[in-house]
Image: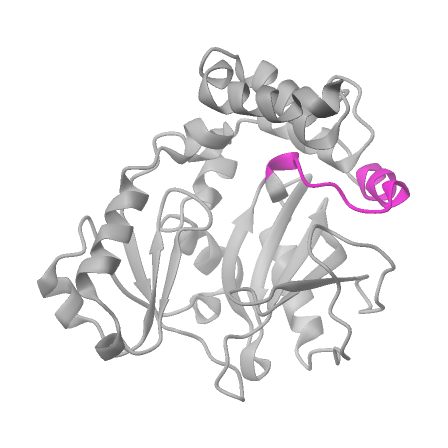
Amino acid sequence: MKKLLHPLLTKFFWGVARHFLSDKGYAKVRYWLELDEWPDIEQPRKFTEKIQFIKLYERTGLRKRVADRTKVRSFVAEKVGKEHLIPLMDTFDTLTEAVWKSLPSRFVLKANHGCGMIRIVSDKEQESFDEIRQQTESWQQTNYFTIGREWVYNNLPRTLLAETLLLDADNNIPKDYKFFCFDGRVKLIQVDYDRFGTQKRNLFDRDFNQIDGRLLYPPYTGTTPEPGCLSEAIEVAEKLSADFNFIRVDLYLPRNTVYFGEMTNYPGNGFVPFEPEALEYQIGSWLDLNR
Protein backbone atom coordinates (compact mmCIF):
# COMPACT_ATOMS: atom_id res chain seq x y z
CA MET A 1 0.00 0.00 0.00
CA LYS A 2 2.78 2.43 0.91
CA LYS A 3 4.44 1.77 -2.44
CA LEU A 4 1.26 2.80 -4.20
CA LEU A 5 0.79 5.87 -2.01
CA HIS A 6 4.43 6.95 -1.96
CA PRO A 7 4.26 9.24 -5.03
CA LEU A 8 1.17 10.95 -3.60
CA LEU A 9 2.70 11.29 -0.14
CA THR A 10 5.88 12.72 -1.62
CA LYS A 11 3.94 15.22 -3.71
CA PHE A 12 1.87 16.24 -0.68
CA PHE A 13 5.03 16.66 1.41
CA TRP A 14 6.78 18.94 -1.09
CA GLY A 15 3.66 20.81 -2.14
CA VAL A 16 1.94 21.37 1.20
CA ALA A 17 3.08 19.57 4.35
CA ARG A 18 6.69 20.74 4.53
CA HIS A 19 5.58 24.35 4.93
CA PHE A 20 3.78 23.52 8.19
CA LEU A 21 6.27 21.12 9.77
CA SER A 22 8.85 22.07 12.39
CA ASP A 23 12.49 21.50 11.45
CA LYS A 24 12.43 18.24 13.41
CA GLY A 25 9.14 17.16 11.84
CA TYR A 26 10.51 17.97 8.40
CA ALA A 27 13.65 15.89 9.07
CA LYS A 28 11.66 12.89 10.28
CA VAL A 29 9.06 12.86 7.50
CA ARG A 30 11.53 13.46 4.68
CA TYR A 31 13.85 10.78 6.09
CA TRP A 32 10.93 8.33 6.10
CA LEU A 33 9.92 9.25 2.56
CA GLU A 34 13.44 8.93 1.16
CA LEU A 35 14.92 6.09 3.24
CA ASP A 36 11.73 4.14 4.03
CA GLU A 37 12.28 4.19 7.79
CA TRP A 38 11.87 6.60 10.68
CA PRO A 39 15.12 8.05 12.01
CA ASP A 40 16.14 7.86 15.64
CA ILE A 41 17.33 11.42 16.07
CA GLU A 42 17.53 11.48 19.87
CA GLN A 43 19.67 8.33 20.13
CA PRO A 44 21.17 8.12 16.65
CA ARG A 45 23.53 5.39 15.49
CA LYS A 46 23.57 5.70 11.71
CA PHE A 47 25.59 8.43 10.04
CA THR A 48 22.51 9.95 8.39
CA GLU A 49 20.68 10.02 11.74
CA LYS A 50 23.61 11.81 13.38
CA ILE A 51 23.65 14.41 10.60
CA GLN A 52 19.98 15.10 11.41
CA PHE A 53 20.98 15.58 15.06
CA ILE A 54 23.72 18.05 14.10
CA LYS A 55 21.32 20.01 11.89
CA LEU A 56 18.79 20.34 14.70
CA TYR A 57 20.97 20.80 17.77
CA GLU A 58 24.45 22.06 16.80
CA ARG A 59 23.56 25.53 15.57
CA THR A 60 26.82 27.38 16.05
CA GLY A 61 28.14 30.56 14.51
CA LEU A 62 31.18 28.67 13.26
CA ARG A 63 29.11 26.19 11.27
CA LYS A 64 27.23 29.11 9.70
CA ARG A 65 30.46 30.95 8.92
CA VAL A 66 32.00 28.06 7.00
CA ALA A 67 28.78 27.53 5.02
CA ASP A 68 29.06 31.09 3.67
CA ARG A 69 31.21 30.89 0.52
CA THR A 70 32.51 34.41 1.07
CA LYS A 71 33.17 34.34 4.83
CA VAL A 72 34.78 30.90 4.75
CA ARG A 73 37.67 32.34 2.75
CA SER A 74 38.97 34.29 5.76
CA PHE A 75 38.56 31.16 7.91
CA VAL A 76 40.67 29.15 5.47
CA ALA A 77 43.32 31.86 5.25
CA GLU A 78 43.57 31.94 9.06
CA LYS A 79 43.81 28.17 9.46
CA VAL A 80 45.94 26.99 6.53
CA GLY A 81 46.98 30.06 4.54
CA LYS A 82 45.51 31.96 1.62
CA GLU A 83 47.65 30.00 -0.85
CA HIS A 84 45.04 27.23 -0.65
CA LEU A 85 42.22 29.52 -1.79
CA ILE A 86 41.03 29.47 -5.40
CA PRO A 87 41.73 32.98 -6.71
CA LEU A 88 38.62 35.13 -6.41
CA MET A 89 37.94 37.46 -9.35
CA ASP A 90 34.94 39.34 -8.01
CA THR A 91 31.83 39.27 -5.85
CA PHE A 92 28.71 41.12 -6.89
CA ASP A 93 25.00 41.42 -6.10
CA THR A 94 23.84 41.17 -9.72
CA LEU A 95 25.38 39.76 -12.88
CA THR A 96 25.20 42.87 -15.03
CA GLU A 97 26.49 43.19 -18.57
CA ALA A 98 29.32 45.36 -17.27
CA VAL A 99 30.36 42.64 -14.80
CA TRP A 100 30.12 40.01 -17.53
CA LYS A 101 32.39 42.00 -19.82
CA SER A 102 34.92 42.48 -17.02
CA LEU A 103 35.35 38.73 -16.49
CA PRO A 104 37.96 36.68 -18.40
CA SER A 105 37.20 34.10 -21.05
CA ARG A 106 36.81 31.27 -18.54
CA PHE A 107 35.80 31.22 -14.89
CA VAL A 108 33.36 29.66 -12.42
CA LEU A 109 30.22 31.39 -11.14
CA LYS A 110 28.83 30.42 -7.74
CA ALA A 111 26.04 31.60 -5.47
CA ASN A 112 26.96 32.34 -1.87
CA HIS A 113 23.89 30.94 -0.13
CA GLY A 114 23.53 27.26 -1.03
CA CYS A 115 24.88 24.13 -2.69
CA GLY A 116 24.74 23.14 -6.33
CA MET A 117 24.52 26.73 -7.60
CA ILE A 118 27.57 26.55 -9.85
CA ARG A 119 28.09 27.44 -13.50
CA ILE A 120 31.34 26.64 -15.29
CA VAL A 121 32.15 29.03 -18.12
CA SER A 122 34.85 27.41 -20.24
CA ASP A 123 34.60 29.90 -23.11
CA LYS A 124 32.65 33.10 -22.55
CA GLU A 125 32.35 33.73 -26.30
CA GLN A 126 30.33 30.52 -26.65
CA GLU A 127 27.92 31.38 -23.82
CA SER A 128 24.71 33.40 -23.74
CA PHE A 129 24.92 36.24 -21.23
CA ASP A 130 21.13 36.46 -21.01
CA GLU A 131 20.79 32.74 -20.27
CA ILE A 132 23.46 32.82 -17.55
CA ARG A 133 22.04 36.02 -16.06
CA GLN A 134 18.63 34.35 -15.82
CA GLN A 135 20.25 31.36 -14.13
CA THR A 136 21.92 33.55 -11.52
CA GLU A 137 18.66 35.40 -10.92
CA SER A 138 16.96 32.05 -10.35
CA TRP A 139 19.64 31.16 -7.80
CA GLN A 140 19.11 34.42 -5.98
CA GLN A 141 15.36 33.97 -5.89
CA THR A 142 15.83 30.56 -4.26
CA ASN A 143 15.56 30.35 -0.49
CA TYR A 144 17.87 27.39 -0.08
CA PHE A 145 17.09 27.09 3.63
CA THR A 146 13.37 26.55 3.15
CA ILE A 147 13.96 23.78 0.59
CA GLY A 148 16.15 21.57 2.76
CA ARG A 149 15.91 23.14 6.25
CA GLU A 150 19.69 23.29 6.45
CA TRP A 151 19.93 25.92 9.16
CA VAL A 152 23.37 27.21 8.19
CA TYR A 153 21.98 28.66 4.94
CA ASN A 154 19.24 30.70 6.60
CA ASN A 155 19.59 34.40 5.79
CA LEU A 156 22.98 34.14 4.10
CA PRO A 157 23.67 37.02 1.67
CA ARG A 158 22.60 36.02 -1.84
CA THR A 159 25.70 37.36 -3.50
CA LEU A 160 27.53 35.89 -6.50
CA LEU A 161 31.19 34.94 -6.78
CA ALA A 162 33.45 34.52 -9.79
CA GLU A 163 36.49 32.29 -9.26
CA THR A 164 39.35 31.05 -11.41
CA LEU A 165 38.50 27.87 -13.31
CA LEU A 166 40.85 25.12 -12.13
CA LEU A 167 42.01 22.57 -14.70
CA ASP A 168 44.11 19.44 -14.30
CA ALA A 169 47.20 18.50 -16.31
CA ASP A 170 44.95 17.30 -19.17
CA ASN A 171 42.99 20.59 -19.14
CA ASN A 172 39.93 18.86 -17.70
CA ILE A 173 37.82 19.76 -14.68
CA PRO A 174 39.72 18.16 -11.77
CA LYS A 175 38.31 15.40 -9.62
CA ASP A 176 36.65 16.36 -6.33
CA TYR A 177 38.31 15.03 -3.17
CA LYS A 178 36.02 15.17 -0.16
CA PHE A 179 37.54 14.46 3.24
CA PHE A 180 35.20 13.23 5.99
CA CYS A 181 36.73 14.55 9.20
CA PHE A 182 35.80 13.32 12.68
CA ASP A 183 37.18 15.23 15.67
CA GLY A 184 39.78 16.77 13.37
CA ARG A 185 40.93 13.50 11.81
CA VAL A 186 40.35 12.33 8.24
CA LYS A 187 38.81 8.85 8.29
CA LEU A 188 37.17 8.65 4.86
CA ILE A 189 37.91 10.15 1.44
CA GLN A 190 35.28 10.45 -1.25
CA VAL A 191 36.44 10.96 -4.83
CA ASP A 192 34.00 12.26 -7.43
CA TYR A 193 34.77 11.78 -11.11
CA ASP A 194 33.25 13.79 -13.99
CA ARG A 195 30.97 15.68 -11.63
CA PHE A 196 29.42 17.73 -14.43
CA GLY A 197 29.04 14.78 -16.79
CA THR A 198 28.45 11.09 -16.10
CA GLN A 199 29.28 11.24 -12.41
CA LYS A 200 30.96 8.34 -10.64
CA ARG A 201 32.14 8.07 -7.03
CA ASN A 202 34.58 5.91 -5.06
CA LEU A 203 35.37 5.74 -1.35
CA PHE A 204 38.82 5.37 0.22
CA ASP A 205 40.30 5.23 3.71
CA ARG A 206 42.86 7.80 4.84
CA ASP A 207 45.68 5.65 3.41
CA PHE A 208 43.89 5.71 0.05
CA ASN A 209 42.85 2.08 0.09
CA GLN A 210 39.54 1.75 -1.74
CA ILE A 211 36.56 0.84 0.44
CA ASP A 212 33.91 -1.62 -0.69
CA GLY A 213 30.94 0.68 -0.40
CA ARG A 214 28.79 3.15 -2.26
CA LEU A 215 27.35 6.60 -1.74
CA LEU A 216 24.60 7.50 -4.23
CA TYR A 217 26.59 7.29 -7.48
CA PRO A 218 27.95 4.16 -9.18
CA PRO A 219 31.64 3.40 -8.71
CA TYR A 220 34.37 4.43 -11.09
CA THR A 221 35.92 1.25 -12.47
CA GLY A 222 39.22 2.67 -13.68
CA THR A 223 42.35 3.01 -11.60
CA THR A 224 42.75 5.96 -9.26
CA PRO A 225 46.39 6.61 -8.40
CA GLU A 226 47.09 8.12 -5.03
CA PRO A 227 47.51 11.89 -5.40
CA GLY A 228 51.08 13.03 -4.93
CA CYS A 229 49.93 15.71 -2.49
CA LEU A 230 47.63 13.45 -0.46
CA SER A 231 49.51 13.95 2.82
CA GLU A 232 49.36 17.73 2.39
CA ALA A 233 45.66 17.54 1.56
CA ILE A 234 44.97 15.49 4.70
CA GLU A 235 46.92 18.00 6.77
CA VAL A 236 44.89 20.89 5.31
CA ALA A 237 41.60 19.07 5.90
CA GLU A 238 42.51 18.21 9.49
CA LYS A 239 43.53 21.76 10.33
CA LEU A 240 40.28 23.12 8.89
CA SER A 241 38.16 20.54 10.71
CA ALA A 242 39.85 20.77 14.12
CA ASP A 243 36.99 22.68 15.76
CA PHE A 244 34.22 20.30 14.64
CA ASN A 245 33.06 16.89 15.81
CA PHE A 246 32.31 16.28 12.13
CA ILE A 247 32.61 18.22 8.92
CA ARG A 248 33.48 17.34 5.34
CA VAL A 249 36.30 19.33 3.77
CA ASP A 250 36.15 19.44 -0.03
CA LEU A 251 39.41 20.00 -1.88
CA TYR A 252 40.75 20.03 -5.43
CA LEU A 253 44.22 18.65 -6.13
CA PRO A 254 45.11 19.66 -9.70
CA ARG A 255 48.77 19.42 -10.66
CA ASN A 256 49.66 18.33 -7.09
CA THR A 257 48.42 21.60 -5.61
CA VAL A 258 45.86 21.71 -2.79
CA TYR A 259 42.96 24.10 -3.32
CA PHE A 260 40.02 24.60 -0.97
CA GLY A 261 36.56 23.99 -2.40
CA GLU A 262 34.10 24.22 0.46
CA MET A 263 33.21 22.87 3.89
CA THR A 264 30.07 20.76 4.07
CA ASN A 265 28.22 20.50 7.38
CA TYR A 266 25.52 18.08 6.22
CA PRO A 267 26.54 15.75 3.35
CA GLY A 268 23.47 14.90 1.32
CA ASN A 269 21.46 16.84 3.90
CA GLY A 270 21.52 13.63 5.94
CA PHE A 271 19.19 11.86 3.51
CA VAL A 272 21.76 9.93 1.45
CA PRO A 273 22.96 6.77 3.22
CA PHE A 274 26.12 4.81 2.69
CA GLU A 275 25.69 1.31 1.29
CA PRO A 276 25.78 -1.35 2.59
CA GLU A 277 23.93 -0.54 5.80
CA ALA A 278 26.84 -1.84 7.87
CA LEU A 279 28.94 1.00 6.47
CA GLU A 280 26.28 3.49 7.61
CA TYR A 281 26.64 2.20 11.16
CA GLN A 282 30.44 2.06 10.99
CA ILE A 283 30.79 5.67 9.83
CA GLY A 284 28.11 6.71 12.28
CA SER A 285 30.18 5.20 15.09
CA TRP A 286 33.01 7.60 14.27
CA LEU A 287 30.84 10.66 14.99
CA ASP A 288 30.90 11.47 18.69
CA LEU A 289 28.01 13.82 19.41
CA ASN A 290 29.16 14.31 23.00
CA ARG A 291 32.35 16.14 21.98
**Up/down of 21 relative to 98, above or below:** above
Which residue in the rendered view is the most extreme toward the left? 98
Image location of residue 44, percent across then percent down: 79, 25
Magenta segment includes 275: yes
- The secondary structure that most of the magenta stretch takes on is helix
Determine the residue positioned at 50% across, 37% down: 62
Q: How is the image coloured?
A: one colour
Q: Is residue 23 visible?
A: yes
Image location of residue 13, percent across then percent down: 54, 20
**Up/down of 26 relative to 60, above or below:** above
Q: Which of the image's four quarters has the C terminus?
A: top right
Q: For the magenta stretch, what is the residue range?
A: 269-285
Image location of residue 176, percent across then percent down: 59, 66
Q: How many marks?
A: 0
Position of 100 with respect to 86 (left or right) is left
Image location of residue 138, percent across then percent down: 28, 44
Determine the residue positioned at 47% across, 33% down: 152
Magenta segment includes 255: no
Q: Which of the image's four quarters has the N terminus?
A: top right
Which residue in the rendered view is the most extreme toward the bottom? 170
In which image quadrant can residue 206 be found? bottom right
- 16 or 67: which is nearer to us? 16
In which image quadrant can residue 83 be found? bottom left
**Up/down of 242 relative to 143, above or below:** below
Q: Is residue 53 visible?
A: no
Determine the residue positioned at 58% across, 74% down: 253
**Up/down of 248 relative to 223, above or below:** above
- 164 or 232: which is nearer to us? 164
Position of 131 with respect to 194 (left or right) is left
